[in-house]
Amino acid sequence: MLIETKKIEDLIPADYNPRKITKRQLEELKQSISKFGYIEPIVWNKTTGHVVSGHQRLKVLSELGYKEIECVIIECSEDEEKLLNVTFNKVGGMFEKDKLFSLLNEAEDEDLAITGFRTIDVIDYNLDKQEREAKKYYGDMRERTYNLYRLHEYDANNVMGNYQIPTLKACHYIPERLIPFEYVRRQTIAVPPNCGVHFFVDDYKLEAIWRVPYKVIPRLKNFACTCTPDFSLYLDMPLAMKIWNFYRSMLIGQMMQKEGMNVIPTLTWAGEDTFDFCFDGIEPGGVYAVSTVCVMRKKETQEAWKIGMQEAIKRLKPECILLYGFNTNIDFDFGNVKVKKFRTQIYERAEVSAQED
C-alpha cells in the first residue's frame, strides 16, 4: 500500500459521491479529529485526481486548518473508482439516493456484487423513482400512460390478427456471429464485422429496451442485424402475459425496422394455445432466431419446443433458422430448412461471443 503526503488543495472531491452525513455527525467527526487526529488516511486516485474515500474527513481537516494530509494512493479507471467509492460507503451512514443509484445504474450486473448492492436493488429503486415522479406530475397523465405502454409507437395500420400484433417484414440477413444484448450497453464495445445481437438473456435485462428504446436502439444500429427481444413465454404463464410479452417483442422489432435496421424475428411459443398469436405479424420466407436454452431440462419442454418448431416451419417456411443454445444438437428434423448454429458460451464476452458450431 502506497501512502503519500498530499496538499489538500490538490485533492478533488468526487461530485458524484453519494455519501452524506448529518450536521451532528459532521460535528462529532470534527471533535474526534480535533482530539485524536485523523487515523484513517484519505484514499486518492492518481489517475483522475479524485478523492475516492474520505470526503467528510477531508472537509473537516480543511476546516481545522490542515494543509497536507496522508493519502493512500491508488491508480484505476473512473468506472472502477466509482464502484470502489460505493463499496467504501456501503459500510455505514446514509446516501443521497439519486446520486447513489445513478452510479449503480452505470455498473454492469457482474460488478454490482462487489459493492454490496444487487441488481434487484437497482431495479426496485428505478421503479420506485418512476412512481414518485408520477405522484409529482400534475400535467397530462394520459401522456405518461402512453409512454409507459409505448402507445405512441403503436401503428394500427401495421398490425395483424385478433390481438393486433405489430408486423415485421422478412429479413434475409444471416450474421456470422451473435453477441448478447447485455454487452451492447458497454460504451467501449468493439463491434465485430457481420455481427448481430441476440436477446436470449434474463428478462429483467430486457426491460431497458422497453423502458427507454430510443436510448438503446442507437447502440443496436451499430451492428449488422439484431434479433427481436425474447420476452419469455413460459408454459405455466397466464395466457394474457404470453400475449403481452409477444406483443412487446414485435412492437420493439417494428420500431427497429422503421430505423432501417436488419431485424430478425425471434420465434417463441409456449404450448399450442399460443399458436393463435405467436406467429402473427411475422412475414414468411425470412431468417428467424430460435433458442434451445432451458429446453433440454424436461421432456415436457422438449416436446413443446418440437411441436412449436414444426408449426413455425409449416407457417413461416423459413429461409434459415439461427439456432442458439447450450446444446444446439437437438433431436429435430428441420427438413430442407438451412440451420446456422450458435452455441452459448458459459462466460460470454463482447469480444468472444457465441460461436458457430
Image (cartoon, grey):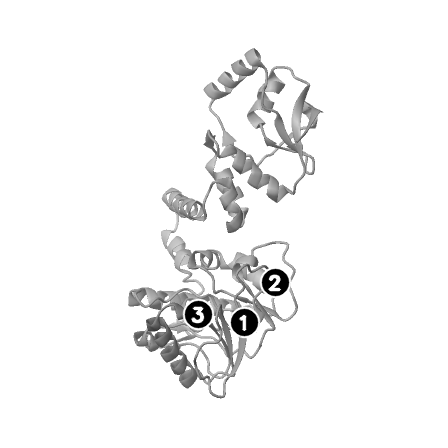
Q: Position of residue 14 (x, y in %)?
A: 60, 34
Name the residue tied to disc 2.
Answer: 352
Residue 54: quarter of image: top right
Q: Is residue 58 above or below residue 230?
A: above
Could you classify mark 3 by the number of other residues whose Cα lies within 10 Å: few (under 14), some (14-19), or many (20 or more)?
Answer: many
How much space separates mark 2 and mark 1, taking CA atoms?
A: 12 Å
Query: Mark 1: which amino acid?
Result: Phe
In what element is the residue under mark 1?
A: strand
Name the residue tied to disc 1.
Answer: 342
In what element is the residue under mark 2?
A: loop
How much space separates mark 1 and mark 3, taking CA atoms?
A: 23 Å
Q: Position of residue 333 (x, y in %)?
A: 44, 84
Query: Mark 2: which amino acid?
Result: Val
How much space separates mark 2 and mark 3, taking CA atoms?
A: 28 Å
Could you classify mark 1 by the number of other residues whose Cα lies within 10 Å: few (under 14), some (14-19), or many (20 or more)?
Answer: many
Residue 296: quarter of image: bottom left
Q: Is residue 256 above or below residue 135?
A: below
Residue for point 56% across, 67% down: 354
Relative placement, left or right, of 111 versus 156 is right
Report whether residue 270 is seen.
Answer: no
Q: How many numbered discs sit on the rendered protein? A: 3
Taking the view exactly as shown, the residue that stands out farthest to the bottom is: 336
Name the residue tied to disc 3.
Answer: 250
Q: Which mark is residue 45?
A: none
Relative placement, left or right, of 323 versus 247 is right
